[in-house]
Image (tube, rainbow, N blue to C red):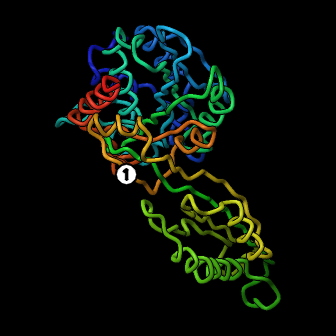
Amino acid sequence: MNPPQNVIELLQALIRIPSVNPDGNPGTEQVGEKACAEFVGTFLETCGAKIEYQDVLPGRPNVIGRFTSGHPGKPRLIFAPHTDTVSVAGMTVDPFAAELRDGKIFGRGASDTKGPMAAMLWALRELRDAIPSLPYEIWFAGLMGEEAGQNGSKAFARDYASAGGTPAFALVGEPTECDIVHAHKGCIWLTLRARGLAVHASTPDRGENAIYKMTDTIRILREEFLPAFAQLSDPVLGSPTLSVGTISGGSKTNIVPDFCDAAVDIRTIPAQDSQRLVDEISARLTGIEIAVRQSLPLHTDPAHPLIAALEKAGGKKAGAPWFCDAAVLAAAGIPSVAAGPGSIAQAHTKDEWISVRDLEGGVEFYRRFLQSF
């Protein structure tokens, strides 16, 4: 592969390396972030960074680049996009062709987050000679597994958050149209299962209908928890939300169902105690099996001086209803925000794309940020 000559070619090269998160139905056998991490590592080396691979899961490393700092003891500034993408199932464009058409680059990850990652990398390349004289030690952390489990950011926070002193700031690459997301909602995913007793549907009184149990459960969530959510509000993020995303159960029309599954998405605000909420729901939903996956909310002080530097570079402060690795890093003591080119409206779509104009604008945004100190 020839070295990319501009940020467009860099993004195309990244898209052409499948790095699909294997969680759920990836839609391809080409899963895992190793090849993408190695490509990013090689590119960072050409920019003067020293590279380390942090093994998180088999074949799924973080890639970490450390730039020469000029002298020791500088606070760290971390550029941290994620290297994985969501499933390619159902896409209407070739997910790995990286087609350039009508001023847009198409493919999985074009927006989320290989576009922001390419813009970050190209800005670092353009400023590689100036980086040692900056007042910050510059790191790049390409994090695996953000789309499910956030194992990459958790491993990075565990092993690197306090290495050589607490980092000053982390800039997470997400498609925010270069808005500075300093607050976002957390997420609680509940996987619910109701169990019943299967009998012939002509004698339903002899069985126990699991679907009825689940509909009662959903009613409790909507009638008891949603009104309480409506009483809470964050000045940036608004109120918490709850949505039942999937439901399935039973095996045949003439059999009383002995199981029913449902998946619930709850978006929390920073003022909520997520674990307490899970405990309250679990206590109320008696007789229902519950599996929980949580992602933290984010709130970084909007008065942080590096947020001001991002504003000077052209961004504006914002909140978001989605979650990202910034919250994991912030929980480890690293003030963090998310900001990058592209729109979240294009993330995870069947024809995912980013405009060339936005991509090149992202390079300018990151470059102005680094030159603002």
Q: For mark 1, give the secondary structure.
A: strand
Q: Residues within 10 Å of mark 1 (few under 14, many from 20)?
A: some
Quadrant location, the C terminus: top left
- 140 and 312: which is toward the camera: 312
Name which quarter of the figure residue 268 lies in: bottom right
Q: Residue at x 67, y 78 (%)?
A: 217
Q: Which residue is mark 1?
A: 318
Eyeballing the image, is 371 above or below 147?
Answer: above
Q: Residue at x 59, y 15 (%)?
A: 52
Eyeballing the image, is 52 above or below 357?
Answer: above
Q: Residue at x 27, y 13 (%)?
A: 5
Q: Residue furthest left?
A: 102
- 179 and 191: which is toward the camera: 179
Q: Residue at x 44, y 61 (%)?
A: 237
Indicate left or right for 176 with 62 as reference: left
The reply to whether residue 209 is visible in this rendering is yes
- 328 and 191: which is toward the camera: 328
Eyeballing the image, is 15 above or below 251?
Answer: above
Eyeballing the image, is 9 above or below 256?
Answer: above
Residue 214 percent coordinates (x, y) = 67, 77
Residue 97 percent coordinates (x, y) = 34, 30
Residue 173 percent coordinates (x, y) = 42, 36
